[in-house]
Image: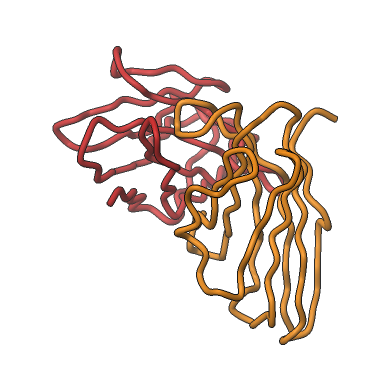
Chain colours: A orange, B red
Amino acid sequence: GAGVSQSPSNKVTEKGKDVELRCDPISGHTALYWYRQSLGQGLEFLIYFQGNSAPDKSGLPSDRFSAERTGGSVSTLTIQRTQQEDSAVYLCASSLGGGSLDEQFFGPGTRLTVL
Amino acid sequence: AQSVTQPDIHITVSEGASLELRCNYSYGATPYLFWYVQSPGQGLQLLLKYFSGDTLVQGIKGFEAEFKRSQSSFNLRKPSVHWSDAAEYFCAVGAEYSTLTFGKGTMLLVSP
């Protein structure tokens, strides 16, 4: 398919474990975004990539959260020492360019449950 | 800092009735405004956007929204709601070189 894909679709982990969430953006999209969607909280911006660099990582909630993007394509969001409050749906989006002018296309998300 | 307020957490509308979802924003300059829809089990889909020009914008699925600068609002409307419109709706604000800030969403329930 030509859309944004994310894996896994669901992840259940134990408190204290590390998890990696993957995002495959639409081919040719230079901008990539990670959001967190918690119940009743809407979409919380986490980090933005332009190519492989992250000009805006202001939304990462703690140093347990990190992300990287390689080859201007696939991105991985890593959460270390997971806590129960990390339970949420993690959404990835990509767009042709950065900023708000270009439409962001969203993936289906990864539902993370921390027990 | 930019912010978006969607005052209604849930709204129930009868099928065939008109719909208006409220969105108020706070932004220092001229904002770019968006409405997204998230159907159950689906990713977010862009309904419509406003950058400049005509303050009444048309979107997909029969939706429209009106930008009112004096009220800092960008309310979403549809004249006749269908059961398939039941979903969560998100308003968002951004600018040319900024990322989007989303509201907390409004869940639309459609009653028969």
Residue B105 horizontal side relative to residue B109, left or right: left
- Nearest the camera: B72 or B28? B28
Q: Check the image and report above or below for A30 versus B5.
A: above
Residue B57 horizontal side relative to residue B27, left or right: right
Number of on-image labels: 0
Residue B80 horizontal side relative to residue A92, left or right: left
Q: Check the image and report above or below for A69 versus B61.
A: below
Indicate the position of residue A11 as horizontal and vertical percent values.
80, 68
Q: Residue at x 33, y 42 (%)?
A: B23
Q: Quadrant of the N terminus of chain A?
A: top right
Indicate the position of residue A68 as horizontal and vertical percent values.
68, 55
- Nearest the camera: B11 or B32? B32
Indicate the position of residue A10 as horizontal and vertical percent values.
81, 62
Q: Residue at x 79, y 78 (%)?
A: A13
Q: Residue at x 73, y 73 (%)?
A: A113
Question: Quarter-wise, where is residue B49 in the image?
Answer: top left
- Nearest the camera: B56 or A70? A70
Q: Quadrant of the C terminus of chain A?
A: bottom right
Residue projecting furthest to the top = B54
Indicate the position of residue A35 as horizontal and vertical percent values.
57, 54
Residue projecting furthest to the left = B70
Q: Residue at x 52, y 46 (%)?
A: B108
